[in-house]
Image (cartoon, grey):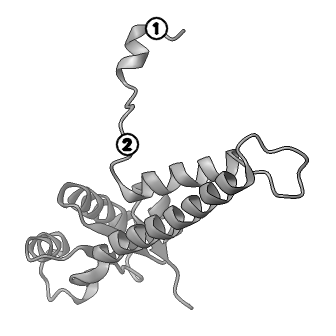
Amino acid sequence: MPAPSALDDVDDGPPVAPADALALVTIASSSFSLPRESSFANPLGWETAANVRHISESLTLQLGSAVRREKAELVRRLYVIIDPLVTGGRDPLDIAQAVVRGGARMLQLRDKDRDKGESLPLAGALQKLCQESGASLIINDHADVAAIVEPAGATRGPD
């Protein structure tokens, strides 16, 4: 039996986020493989097994829809691209702070021409801002910078 302190961190309640509930239903569905009618024995009975399968499929569809709505909300508002070369001399971080205060939920750092040594501190500051404000950051074209600052995503252009 685990130590009592280990049990303090266990949450026996239902999942709070739709993504967590979807993961739980997916795991339950795959680990509770319902016998098909071609099986020799079914301790649940065929009607019960079919009902459980139907409920599991319905939950998966409903939770998948809830997760998609939740993720769509991230980009439903203002999506701002920050490019230090086109800020008109203003500090890109100041611009990012202002747009986040104004409701931006997604920032994209587009810094194609500057040295990565200049880009990395800005990327880190933008990621910190996004984490603190509930926004998401996308890093444009630099997978190595993205690997360091761990943004919500990265994109690679055609060039």
Q: Is residue 66 left or right of residue 92?
A: right
Amino acid type at circle 2 is Pro
Residue 115 at least partly seen: no
Q: Secondary structure at mark 1?
A: loop
| Residue 3 circle label | 1
The residue lying at 85 percent from left, 44 percent from top is 41
Query: Would you identify the image quadrant in which residue 12 lies?
Result: top left
Would you name the residue on which mark 2 appears?
14
* Cα gap from disc 2 to disc 1, whole angstroms: 23 Å
Q: Which amino acid, mark 1?
A: Ala
Secondary structure type for disc 2: loop
What residue is rendered at 13% in x and 76% in y? 103
Q: Which mark is residue 121?
A: none
Decide: is 67 above or below 107. above
**Callout 2–callout 1 Cβ contact below 8 Å:** no
In the picture, the quarter occupied by the N terminus is top right
